[in-house]
Amino acid sequence: MNKSLPDTFFKPGTVAVVGASKKANFSSGIPETLVKNGYRDRLYLVNPREREINGMPVHADLAAVPVPIDLAIVVVPAPQVPRVIRDCINLGSPSVVLESAGFGETGPEGALLEEEVRRLLKGSQTRVIGPNCLGVINPHASFTTTQVNLEALRPGNIGVIAQSGTFGNILADWAPTQDLFFSKLVTIGNRLDVDETDCLLYLADDDQTDVIVLYLEGVKDGGRFYEAARNVSRRKPILVYKGGRSQAGRKAAASHTGSLTGEDELYDAIFRQTGVIRAASFQELFDMARVFSREPLMAGPRVCVATVSGSFGVMTADVCTAWGLELPDLSPQTVCALRDIAPSWMNVKNPLDLGPSGIYDAAIKAALADPRIDGIIAVPVIPEIVMQKYTELGVDVGSMFGDPQEWRRLAPGKPILMFTVGGASWCDHVRKVYGADISLVSSPENAARALAASCRYGRFRAGG
């Protein structure tokens, strides 16, 4: 099934930029980005109308490059692409990222050009990602085929496959602000050759990837995707946002990447049968990615909600129940332990409405130790004016709510999610103190959805 997506897409020894130019355009910064990340002595520029760019020699065509090329980044106008692809095939280049637009997404004429390139590739060993894409980003190898700040990207274990090129770039910009850490990021565009299934199978075997995220507008080969997803899901969680649910979305997808999106109910059935986890929104997709990349799978559906605000406890309880989770009574031992230290006004029950009791840390620890609880949703909040006052007094607010590393040590097998809302200084503080150790999510709904998905996926992996 796997058509052998070569590693040279993600860690090439030599790279050529075909169509490199001095003119300011969307691709002009690619050579600069590659040089900045250590590729100067392995980078070759190709353009018959240039002799040098930023002090680097420029070759008339790929045949004039003095070494074999592992990866060609192609940014020439669409009508010139067949000639360049023919050169890549003749020279034995294994990998091509075709970033040029003007193919099937533009209409019949572009579709014919796309089909011409597909015919050229038939029977060859050259693989092509694109067209109409921005290619790959590999933070682990400090390699990219597009302009992105690799220094800001901390390597991680989330692999991303997206049909949209700009979507991938924006994700790379956004990820460092959200405690999201990618292993590989691939944008596949029109899928002239390499498609979502090829990338899925590659990431399934990638030791640096533990969670696979897909943004899809359509599936190129439904049967092949079904078989691959069913097999890969038994090893690694697959999270997907499927675009084109509405008629307007389907029309946009057709003009964006030339995708035929198909019936949404069919995709729902495929995802259910293969264990793929479907997200309803962009934010939910990456909240779940964060949770699946960090947290152990839920052993069961039983959740404890610990909050400082009773209203957030009610909201979170409602959404947990809606997603099939349970909020059981705490064990008698947990109740007794907390009543011994709780103020008289506090009810010791699930959800734990802790208010200004000062026992938030103790409550989380007790809930983690409770055999009736499979996971925690923590909702610490504090008014901004109080936060500012504590800061002025030099009070360590972090110590008021507990040490996240200690929580992890106490219950390494239980997921802990945290949601908060409030002023800028409080939210910044939570991210600084808890973001490295606890999965921060954007809403109670996404916390519940992620834990419910974790529980169901755990059953799927176990064969249930």
Image (cartoon, helix red, strand yellow):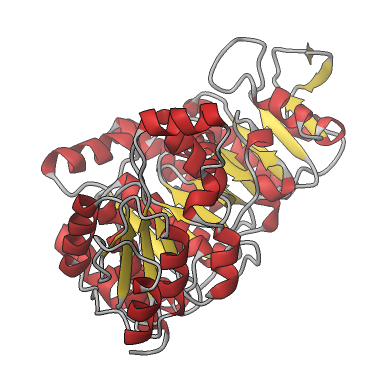
Q: Residue furthest left?
A: 247
In x, y percent, where is residue 226?
A: 35, 72
> Where in the figure is residue 372, as x and y percent of width and height?
34, 84
Left or right of residue 277: residue 213: right
Q: Quadrant of residue 50?
A: top right
From the viewer's perspective, is residue 380 above or below residue 237?
A: above
Please state which of residues 343 and 227 is positioned toward the viewer in this rendering: 343
Can residue 165 be seen in the rendering of this structure? no
Q: Residue furthest top?
A: 23
| Residue situated furthest front in the rendering | 344
Camera-side residue: 343 or 426? 343
> Relative to 34, is 211 above or below?
below
Marker count (numbered): 0
Q: Nearer the viewer, residue 205 or 379?
A: 379
Above or below for 132 versus 45? below
Q: Which residue lies at the image location 41% right of the left edge and 88% below the top edge?
A: 462
Question: Quadrant of residue 385 in the image?
Answer: top left
For the C terminus, the quadrant is: bottom left
- The x, y position of residue 432, in whole percent, is 56, 42
Q: Is residue 208 left or right of residue 218?
A: right
